[in-house]
Image (cartoon, helix red, strand yellow):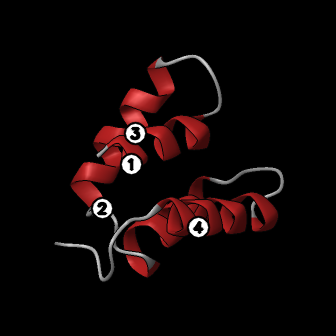
Amino acid sequence: MPPDQAVTALSLFTGFARIGLLGFGGVAPIARHVIVEERRWLDDRDYAAVLGLGQILPGANTVNAAAIIGDR
């Protein structure tokens, strides 16, 4: 599923800023909602792959996801 809009640095910033502001204490559910359902940057399968890769890398999972999505 292609994204509704181009994934720009600004859209990554605003998307992950929203995740950070709304997801205090645990961001996995809100991160999936924003990335898969709202922004449609990834589908469920790609999100699971990005999350799995983010979990084996050092650092926060959502920060790793932001870097991976931004790199794509």
Indicate the secondary structure of the residue bearing disc 1: helix
For the residue pair 23 and 67, the one nearer the viewer reads as: 67
Residue at 58% from the left image edge and 67% from the top image edge: 15
- Disc ID at residue 68: 3
The picture places residue 10, in percent across and down from the top left corner, at 56, 66
Label 4 – label 3 distance at C-alpha = 14 Å
Please say if 48 is above or below 36. Answer: above
Label 2 – label 3 distance at C-alpha = 11 Å
Q: Is residue 2 left or right of residue 59?
A: left
Label 2 – label 1 distance at C-alpha = 8 Å
Q: Which residue is mark 4?
A: 15
Q: Residues within 10 Å of mark 2 (few under 14, many from 20)?
A: some
The picture places residue 29, in percent across and down from the top left corner, at 58, 61
The picture places residue 60, in percent across and down from the top left corner, at 65, 32
Indicate the secondary structure of the residue bearing disc 2: loop
**Label 2 or label 3, whichever comes before in sequence order:** 2
Residue at 29% from the left image edge and 40% from the top image edge: 49
**Label 2 or label 1, whichever comes before in sequence order:** 2
Q: Is residue 19 left or right of residue 71?
A: right
Say if mark 2 contacts mark 1, CB within 8 Å. yes
Q: Which residue is mark 2?
A: 42
Label 4 – label 1 distance at C-alpha = 11 Å
Q: Amino acid at mark 1?
A: Ile
Q: Which residue is mark 1?
A: 69
**Label 4 or label 1, whichever comes before in sequence order:** 4
Say if mark 4 contacts mark 3, CB within 8 Å. no
Q: Amino acid at mark 3?
A: Ile
Residue at 67% from the left image edge and 62% from the top image edge: 19
The picture places residue 41, in percent across and down from the top left corner, at 34, 66
